[in-house]
Image (tube, rainbow, N blue to C red):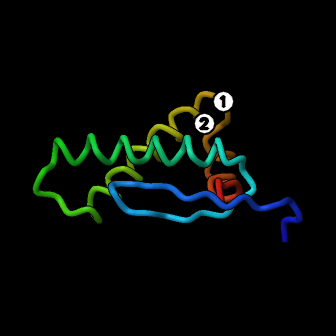
Amino acid sequence: MDDREKNRVTLMIMGEEYVLRGTSSPEDINRVGRYVDNLMRKLTEKNVQMSRHRIAVLAALNIADELLKIKEKAIPAEETEKRSTDDGLV
């Protein structure tokens, strides 16, 4: 188990409160929360009939696409897939 101190941060995403605990700094966790909130709001504006659940999945797919494009520029493809679940925010 990770011995680093866990920070507790409360985020508001799409009007809902989420309490996260993680080893990232509170500033980083808040920045990620704002990014997700902004993306989900933009997707909601473009897809007004779509449920929040589907908006969340669409946001996750968009963020994963962004991440993989960045990783592909820096790391060979097979290494990217091996490391895809090793690191996380929380």
Front position in the image: 15 or 66: 15
Residue 81, how many percent across, how many down?
61, 51
Q: Quadrant of the C terminus?
A: bottom right
Residue at 12% across, 51% down = 48
> Which residue is the extreme one toward the bottom?
1
Q: Which residue is mark 2?
A: 71
Residue at 46% across, 41% down = 35
| Residue 75 relative to residue 52: left or right | right
Packing grade of label 1 (10 A; few <14, some 14-19, many >=20) is few
Three-letter amino acid code at disc 1?
A: Ala
Q: Quadrant of the N terminus?
A: bottom right
Packing grade of label 2 (10 A; few <14, some 14-19, many >=20) is some
Front position in the image: 53 or 16: 16
Residue at 69% across, 46% down = 79
> Which residue is the extreme one toward the top?
73
Q: Are marks 1 and 2 in contact (CB under 8 Å)?
A: yes
Q: How many marks?
A: 2
Front position in the image: 13 or 75: 13
Residue 28, placed above or below residue 53: above
| Residue 42 relative to residue 83: left or right | left
Three-letter amino acid code at disc 2?
A: Lys
The circle drawn on residue 38 is none
Q: Which residue is mark 1?
A: 74
Residue at 60% across, 36% down = 71
Residue 34, how many percent across, how many down?
46, 43
How far apart, in angstroms, are the residues tagged by discs 1 and 2? 5 Å
Residue 4, how many percent across, how many down?
86, 59
Helix, strand or loop status at disc 2: helix
| Residue 53 relative to residue 68: left or right | left
